[in-house]
Amino acid sequence: MRRETILNLAIPGILLATALIAYAMDEPYIITLATKAAILALAGVGLNIALGLGGLVSLGHAAFFGVGGYAMGILAFHAQNYMPIWGVIEGTKSMPIIWLVALIASALTALVIGAMSLRTTGVYFIMITLAFGQMLFYFAISWPTYGGEDGMSIYLRNGFPGVNTLVPLNFFLICFVILAVVMVLTDRLGKSAFGLALQATRQNAARAEAVGLAPYRLRLVAFTISGAVTGLAGALFADLNRFVSPSMLSWHMSGEIMILIILGGIARLSGPVAGAMLFIALEYVLEDLSHYWHVYLGAILLGVVLFARGGVIGLIAGREVAHD
Amino acid sequence: MSLLKLSHVSAFYGASQALFDVHLDLAEGEVLALMGRNGMGKSTTVKVICRMLKNRGGSVMFDGLDLGSVPAHKAARAGIGLVPEGRRCFAPLTVQENLIAAARKGHWDMARVSELFPRLGERQDQVASSLSGGEQQMLAIGRALMTNPRLLILDEATEGLAPVIRQEIWAAIRQLKVEAGLSILVIDKSLKELGGVADKGVIIEKGVTVWTGAFSDLTRDVTDRHLGV
């Protein structure tokens, strides 16, 4: 078994073990941190489909994260107030329905944004995705029905059939299982004819066209799937905090998701998981040391970019190809 | 009936005109050698056929389809398979992944490509960038075959390769002609090797077709005038 394959199993295993040990030691805060890491990792796995497989440097993925969050917030808000949306559609507190709506809403948003953004490349693509993200951010700020700048609170965590989601470990396990399933599917996607064609397009679009691959279409599909996964993470993040606000849509959030991928390793299957765990751990440790913990994080990030370009996974497994 | 027909084709790189009046005609099952000195427009003609460069004048017809407004990927899907100059495989992907990425349904599959180039079968899990030049060239041909083309274009397929590997590639090209009956447009500097496979020849000079005919009619006088250094 290759070293990277072992890491792909071990890193999520460490995350699971952390939550289980914290449960045994009655440390619910650590379980919450592990849950946050699992959700951010899921968002990272989503972005990694566009960035790692497709080479699409998107600075607007917070848009999908936020759309997923608001899908959860709006449905739960209407359910808890017994007030149908537009007087017609009932709200819901059911997680599976919320996830489905979040997936569809963020996929559609990604499809529309991608259809326009993917006509550009390089720095223009980065800027246009950033601009779309900020458009949605300012839209959320000026949307008083759902809290505007203050956001909105959901009193009770949404429900999952047969599971008490208020128990931190239960909610962690839900998030972890989703993360594991999405990682398996992403792995399959990367090895499928579609995934290989996408990687070929990333390497050289003109060469890929010469063998009959349509780069624009391939990238649009990848961007849409990527947005949908990130949106699902947004719905879970909102459920974790029981709070939705425009900050989920801000460019800071896009940057945070990208940072954790860079930390873990771009195009590495477990890179976002390693990155998210490291990011949360650093936040937890460094925040105690100083208010200005982002400075230390910045220094670490610089170190990774300069000396470990394959991120944590690259450092351990070596700079071999991403697929295994 | 023509499979590929170029009539009075002109093309530009920005403001610079590269092709002025190119015409060629290739029938199904034929092998056509596209010849000319360096910089005369052979690779530009290939780019026009594959729609990587749009022609400004004239017409490019492939199997009755006017390729005028067709994008590159649709030209490839219509049945034009390109083995580009300088090999150019998808370097980070393995041999198998390079082939799967380009695969479309048809006669050519992994097994048949491996049969044509046994080295590829042996190295299917090896990353393309770690292959030798000759193996990369075999992979580039295999990848083009995996698109199941009706026309295979080989642009300087044997350039820079060791003599033994060149022989292997030429043997494969002959096999493609005789056993698979594939239409082939081949660019190469070796007239001797071209003579072993080509039915027809076209010579381009300064972006203009200056000679066309059966390869066997290519005289010393013509080669000295248009291909000599």
Image (cartoon, coloured by chain):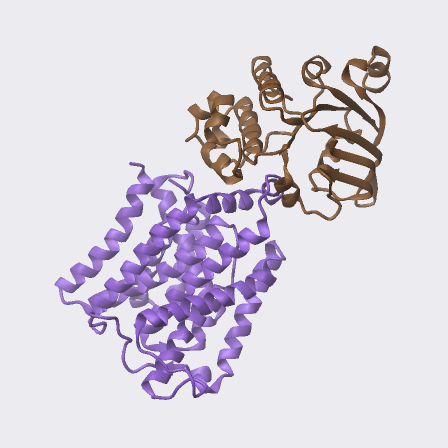
On screen, residue B145 versus residue B10, left or right, reads: left
Residue A300 lies, with reference to residue B201, above or below; the image says below
Residue B186 versus residue A156 in the image, above or below: above
The quadrant the N terminus of chain A occupies is: top left
The brown-tinted chain is B
Residue A147 in view: no
Estimate the x, y position of residue B42 in percent, counting from the top left. Answer: 75, 30
B219 to B57, vertically: above or below: above
Residue that appears at 52% across and 59% down: A58
Where, by quadrant of the figure, is residue A177 drawn?
bottom left
Q: On the rendered structure, is B153 left or right of A261?
A: right
Give residue B212's position: percent from left, percent from top.
Answer: 82, 23
Instruction: Name the one closer to the observer, A272 or A200.
Output: A200
Q: Is residue A216 left or right of residue A251?
A: right
Most extreme residue toward the front, as rendered? B1
Measuring 73% from the left and 28% from the top, which residue is drawn there?
A: B27
Is residue A274 something that shows in the picture?
Answer: yes
The chain coloured purple is A
**Quadrant of res B193:** top right
Q: Say which residue appears at 60% left-offset and 54% top-offset.
A: A122
Q: Position of residue A255 (x, y in %)?
A: 46, 62
Q: Quadrant of residue A182?
A: bottom left
* Image quadrant where one finds the C terminus of chain A: top left
Residue pictured at 58% horizontal, 49% vertical: A215
Where in the figure is residue A191, as x and y percent of width and height?
Answer: 42, 43
